[in-house]
Amino acid sequence: MINTLIHTFQITKHFIAHTVNVFSVWILPVMLLAFLLTALYKKIPLYETFIDGAKEGFDIGVRIIPYLVGILVAIGMFRASGAIEFLAHALSPILKLIGMPADILPLAIIRPLSGSGALGITTEIAKHYGGDSYMARLAAVMTGSSETTLYVIAVYFGSVGITKIRHALIAGIVADIAGMLAALFICRLIFL
């Protein structure tokens, strides 16, 4: 009975891993094709719409530069101060309880602040443990399952003049924590 359950779980685990692999390879081409077909169906001029969007993106890019500089300086000060290492040490009992490796915590802390900072930490983890390791996969899934919440609030809310963010910060942080815990659960289920 136990051997049957273990064998069934192994088959299910391989099936889930294979399905995730196929899905991750095809999702972007399918989405692009869906956008193009939808635009053709609705008779939207693709090239003109793209150019208008690019112009608008350039204007937004110029407006967000001061906010971008501010958030990048704050992130640099946060990393250089050693606050990440202090938090990792302070939160180690909780990490053991939920099964999160301590080396992932800097990624979990920096991800809501900076996408490039999170990418740098993910790259360091992949170099240290290897690209196909559990740690590298966990870091990649966590990065993809969360958002640069503070960066988005600072830059994009600032670019359109929103000063009262109301519940956006709390909702964003809760969503980030939920995404990271889900990434941890899925990665433990599939890759361990």
Image (cartoon, rainbow, N blue to C red):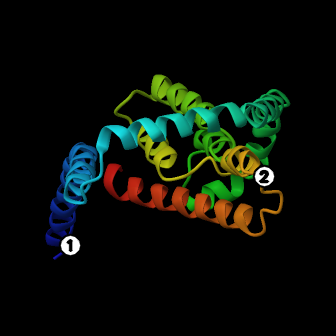
Amino acid at the residue labelled 2: Gly
- Give the camera-side residue of 96 and 107: 107
Among the two numbered marks 1 and 2 on one chain, the one whose residue lies closer to the N terminus = 1
| Residue 7 x %, y % | 15, 63
Label 2 element class: loop
Amino acid at the residue labelled 1: Ile
In the image, residue 65 above or below residue 53: above
**Residue under circle 2?**
161
Crowding near the residue tagged with mark 1, few <14, some 14–19, many ≥20 C-alpha atoms within 10 Å = few
Crowding near the residue tagged with mark 2, few <14, some 14–19, many ≥20 C-alpha atoms within 10 Å = few
Between label 1 and label 2, give the one nearer the viewer.
2
Residue placed at 65% from the left, 52% from the top? 149
Measured in 3D between alpha carbons, the distance from the residue under mark 1 to the one under mark 2, in whole angstroms, is: 61 Å
| Residue 37 x %, y % | 19, 53
Pick the quarter of the image with the N terminus.
bottom left
Residue placed at 36% from the left, 59% from the top? 189
Q: Residue furthest bottom?
A: 1
In the image, residue 173 above or below residue 18: below
On residue 2, the disc is 1
